[in-house]
Image: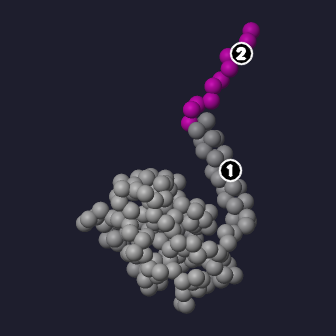
Amino acid sequence: MPVAARRLPSWAWVTGLTAGAIVAVGALTLQADKGERPAVTAAKPSASASASPRPPASRPSAPAKAAVPEGSGTGRRIVYSLQQRRVWLVDADDAARRTFLVWPGTVDPDPGNYTISLRKDATTGSDGVEIQHIVYFTVKSGVNIAFSNAVDGASPNPAAGAQTGGIRMATADGSALWAFGATGTKVRVVN
């Protein structure tokens, strides 16, 4: 006489699949961390033809090669200059692997040391723009401060009176920062 097959409860399947996914993501993270680093670029982000692009005249002029700011720390880190509106991806040997201009929101982080606390693949920004490669590193006055790029590459002006903490960048720069900035990566904000 045949014996009835026992089914695994659904929680067992979910637990097993979740554990497998965590192991796979961890392995991919280690593999990506050992990969080639992006090259330094001084490319200026350009606004797309969106409904309300930020006028290029509001952007500071970009030096041909911007040096990593003095006093921005040591080791592998992301450096963000409030005055220059520029980000550097700095490797463990203190060499800038990439630098680019950004479009800050209306709420600036205070100068200081932070770490990347959360990453999201994609969402809708507080300004209603579809964004991707969101890398959160602090909160100020109840507003989340994060690096991201608009999916369509736009650099819209923040809505009048809205408090936004998104530091937007060109799509290619957003991809590079996403690859560089794992959770726990240091972020140094300087004036």
Asked if the stretch drawn in magenta spans residue 6, the answer is yes
Task: Answer few, some or many: residues within 10 Å of disc 2's Cα (few below 14, many 20 plus, some between 14 and 19).
Answer: few
Residue 65 showing in the rendered view: yes
* Camera-nearest residue between 146 and 99: 99
Q: Residue at left 58%, top 82%?
A: 64
User: Type of residue at label 1?
Assistant: Ala
Which picture quadrant has residue 176?
bottom right
Asked whether, in this view, residue 95 is left or right of residue 114, the answer is right
- Where is residue 71 shown, x and y percent of the image? 54, 90
Above or below, comparing residue 97 to residue 161 in the picture: below
Q: Secondary structure at mark 1?
A: helix
Residue at point 67% right, 16% down?
4
Instruction: Please report the residue visible at 58 percent of the width from the left and 86 percent of the height from the top.
Output: 67
- Report which residue position mark 2 lands on: 3
Tell me which residue sits at (69%, 55%) in the image.
28
| Residue 159 in the image: above or below residue 96 | above
Image: magenta residue range? 1-11
